[in-house]
């Protein structure tokens, strides 16, 4: 414990005044960061922010689902999060007849709430430093041994801190790239119900056109509730479960705020890599990002073409489409900003300084020579890996089929236990049902054809699976022609047993490897996956191992070289606090972006019938009448819809509470701005903004538009 405290306090205490960069650990806000927070306008004590014995703000913050944040806003377990975080649950609850995704949904009493099966939330119970139980045992080990030992020790500690009987799960997170270790202990609740959502035309207003851009006018929120057994403990869904009485919930302020006011965000930023090497930046801008963007572009066009035609297809593909589109635009923007801000060159400058400092220090002096070799060894295969994951396996048929590789090898093994094969088949049968439920054949067949062709054109011929493209040529024609792949894909879709119930059931009844090996979908997906795992994945594993180890050493060196440098650990999907202010900005010469946008702008963007900019008739009617009730902002004399702050957040923070200086909720963070899409790798203090939906717009939608006064009356409203 002491070791981490001592080191961290040192990093922290020597930094005087900060910009707004930093994803701080709630237990280690430290005197200097705390003092700076106070200077910026925080009125709470450190114990009101984080305390493991008494109720504190941290008790109101949850991990929502697999990759978002949510916050508790009533003493009956009411949760606010983003619409895009509830999106999958909303789409799953919807049907063509009860289309909640399109029309919205409001529960006017608890019996109308809809169980969201498979969804869970996790409360953070405590964080403890376990560095002493890991780091000394790793000293002096090689990269291989270290990685192995580290995961063993982490697994043991995870088990030690977990308690399955109470749904308590512990996860040790390596921080500062493995220079520190903290255990995060969570309790998971699995009975989560949908309480309300605006129509998608509000929750996703502006669609992908406005995504990652300011100004945007999106009501990106949804409302859920966490239930527990009668004793307050986690319980699987049961009718008799009761709303959870939380340790703490956030009051909601409708007072409004001004440019420059204090704002902090608690939540779960997923990943950043602020000490990435220049080699990593180059790999991203030259190979990884553009490849991903090109492949996703093709997949998105194929899906969109079908979603437009049919509401059922739209519901089926909506959630996957949104996820693919979100990071398609992200990585395209990331590349542009990395180049524009010359991040590669800036990293090189920093590295040159380090290299000078490291001369004569055996632990550090060879880092960059080594690193350069590690990247050169991996680079020839990097594109192949992206083309496999984002291209070949971007077809859902191929992705499902590729999961059968293990079944094939089990069937081929001499003397393998028959129950192993049987279990594999049962799992495959269940997975096939899920795959078919979500499958849209028309778009998937187009994706299969297009991505197979892209692989042929763009990947080094020496890396192609042996014989595959020759067999396409002999059966379907010129491998340069798109039409050849269309014919081939059509044949795969009509002949594969994976898409044919009778053939599949015959296979399940009398399984044998040859049937699988002769299936055209398997020949393809299995072939590409085995080609990669057999020949190229070993290079990748070596790359990851060495890259991680050099990254750890580099960071260790930086901390020694420059002990005054402001340090906070990279995001690891563990709870963080970011503090800063509501803040306007100047994206480029002569342009100034205001810190709020309003209903006036919603109406300006409105395009009736448009896929992204349509609006519910009732919203237009109420907005034209300026019927904003107690939610109006008196300064702008309009309803504020969204606002921006200079907080440091990233994906995973979606749904995070934006909290004012006195601990009240003023908005939900839901996006980042285009000018700072390089933020995972380099924080830009002038450009970086967090985009938030104003809580008054959220409440207006619930109250005026949805008529769900029952939800409003559960909240603790702060009016002055
Ligand atoms: N960019 C947002 C984020 O990653 C998600 C926005 C979802 N909306 C969309 N149009 N895809 O937090």
Image (cartoon, rainbow, N blue to C red):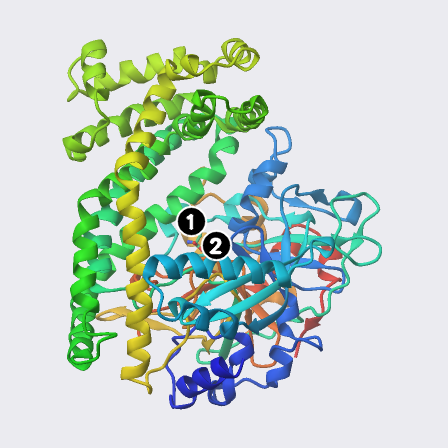
Q: 588 or 680, which is in the foreground?
A: 680
Secondary structure type for disc 1: loop
Residue 313 lies, with reference to residue 673, above or below; the image says above
Asked if residue 685 shows in the view, the reply is no
Where in the figure is residue 683, as x and y percent of width and height? 32, 70
Q: Assess mark 2: CB under 8 A from ligand 1?
A: yes
Which residue corresponds to mark 2?
Answer: 218
The picture places residue 664, in percent across and down from the top left corner, at 62, 74
Q: Which mark is residue 594?
A: none
- Judge the density around disc 1: few (<14), some (14-19), many (≥20) Cα neighbours within 10 Å: many
Q: In this view of the protein, which residue sits in the foreground, 65 or 514?
A: 514
Relative side of 411 to 127, left or right: left
Q: Position of residue 102 (x, y in %)?
A: 56, 38
Of callouts 2 and 1, which one flags the residue occurring earlier in the amino acid sequence? 1
Check the picture and name the quadrant holding the N terminus: bottom right
Q: Quadrant of residue 221?
A: bottom right
Q: Relative to residue 119, is residue 531 drawn left or right?
A: left
Q: Residue at x 47, y 14 (%)?
A: 512
Asked if labels 1 and 2 touch by Cβ distance under 8 angstroms, the answer is: yes
Is 85 on the left-hand or right-hand side of 379? Answer: right
Q: Is residue 545 visible?
A: yes
Outermost residue on the front side: it is 415
Residue labelled 1 has its Cβ within 8 Å of some atom of ligand 1: yes
- The residue carrying mark 1 is 206
């Amino acid at each position: 414990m002491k070791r981490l405290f001592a080191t961290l306090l040192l990093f922290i205490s020597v930094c005087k005044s900060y910009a707004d960069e930093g994803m701080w650990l709630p237990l280690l806000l430290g005197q200097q960061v705390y003092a700076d927070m106070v200077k910026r306008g925080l009125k709470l004590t450190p114990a009101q922010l984080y305390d493991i014995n008494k109720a504190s703000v941290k008790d109101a913050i949850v991990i929502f689902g697999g990759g978002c944040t949510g916050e508790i806003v009533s003493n009956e377990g009411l949760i606010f999060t983003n619409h895009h975080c509830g999106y999958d649950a909303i789409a799953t609850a919807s049907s063509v007849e009860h289309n909640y995704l399109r029309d919205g949904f409001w529960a006017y009493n608890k019996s109308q709430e809809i169980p969201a099966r498979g969804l869970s939330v996790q409360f953070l119970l405590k964080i403890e430093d376990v560095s002493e139980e890991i780091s000394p045992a790793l000293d002096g080990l090689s990269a291989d041994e270290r990685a192995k030992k580290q995961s063993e020790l982490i697994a043991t500690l995870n088990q030690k801190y977990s308690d399955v009987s109470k749904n308590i799960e512990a996860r040790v997170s390596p921080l500062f790239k493995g220079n520190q270790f903290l255990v995060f202990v969570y309790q998971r609740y699995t009975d989560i119900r949908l309480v309300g959502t605006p129509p998608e035309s509000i929750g996703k207003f502006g669609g992908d056109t406005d995504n990652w851009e300011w100004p945007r006018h999106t009501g990106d929120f949804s409302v859920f509730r966490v239930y527990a057994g009668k004793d307050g403990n986690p319980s699987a869904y049961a009718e008799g479960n009761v709303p959870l009485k939380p340790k703490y919930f956030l009051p909601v302020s409708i007072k409004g705020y001004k440019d420059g006011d204090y704002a902090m965000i608690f939540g779960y930023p997923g990943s950043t890599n602020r000490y990435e090497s220049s080699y990593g930046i180059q790999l991203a801008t030259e190979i990884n990002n553009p490849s991903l963007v090109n492949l996703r572009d093709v997949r998105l066009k194929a899906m969109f073409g079908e979603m437009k035609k049919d509401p059922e297809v739209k519901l089926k593909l909506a959630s996957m489409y949104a996820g693919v589109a979100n990071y398609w635009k992200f990585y395209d923007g990331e590349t542009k900003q990395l180049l524009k801000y010359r991040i590669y060159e800036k990293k090189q400058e920093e590295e040159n300084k380090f290299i000078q400092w490291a001369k004569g220090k055996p632990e550090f002096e060879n880092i960059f020579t080594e690193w350069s070799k590690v990247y050169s060894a991996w680079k020839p295969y990097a594109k192949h890996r992206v083309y496999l994951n984002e291209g070949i396996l971007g077809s859902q048929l191929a992705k499902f089929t590729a999961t059968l590789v293990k079944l094939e090898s089990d069937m081929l093994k001499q003397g393998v236990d028959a129950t192993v094969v049987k279990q594999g088949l049962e799992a495959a049968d269940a997975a096939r049902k899920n795959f078919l439920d979500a499958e849209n054949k028309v778009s998937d067949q187009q994706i299969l054809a297009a991505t197979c062709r892209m692989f042929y054109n763009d990947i080094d011929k020496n890396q192609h699976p042996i014989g595959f493209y020759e067999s396409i040529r002999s059966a379907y024609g010129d491998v340069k022609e798109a039409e050849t792949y269309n014919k081939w894909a059509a044949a795969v879709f009509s002949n594969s047993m994976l898409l044919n119930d009778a053939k599949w059931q015959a296979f399940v009844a009398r399984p044998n490897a040859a049937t699988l090996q002769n299936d055209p979908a398997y020949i393809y997906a299995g072939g590409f996956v085995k080609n990669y795992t057999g020949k190229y994945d070993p290079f990748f594993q070596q790359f990851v191992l060495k890259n991680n180890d050099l990254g750890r050493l580099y960071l260790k060196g930086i901390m020694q070289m420059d002990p005054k440098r402001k340090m906070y650990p990279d995001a690891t999907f563990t709870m963080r606090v970011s503090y800063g202010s509501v803040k306007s900005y100047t994206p480029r010469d002569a342009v100034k972006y205001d810190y709020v946008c309003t209903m006036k702008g919603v109406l300006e963007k409105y395009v009736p019938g448009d896929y992204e900019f349509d609006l519910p008739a009732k919203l237009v009617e109420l907005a034209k009448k300026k019927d904003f009730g107690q939610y109006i902002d008196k300064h702008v004399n309009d309803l504020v819809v969204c606002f921006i702050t200079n907080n440091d957040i990233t994906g995973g923070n979606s749904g995070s509470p934006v909290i004012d200086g006195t601990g009240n909720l003023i908005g939900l963070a839901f996006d980042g701005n285009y000018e700072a899409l390089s933020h995972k790798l380099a924080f830009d203090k002038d450009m970086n903004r967090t985009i938030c939906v104003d809580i008054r717009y959220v409440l207006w939608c619930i109250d005026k538009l949805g008529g769900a006064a029952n939800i409003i009356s559960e909240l603790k409203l702060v009016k002055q």
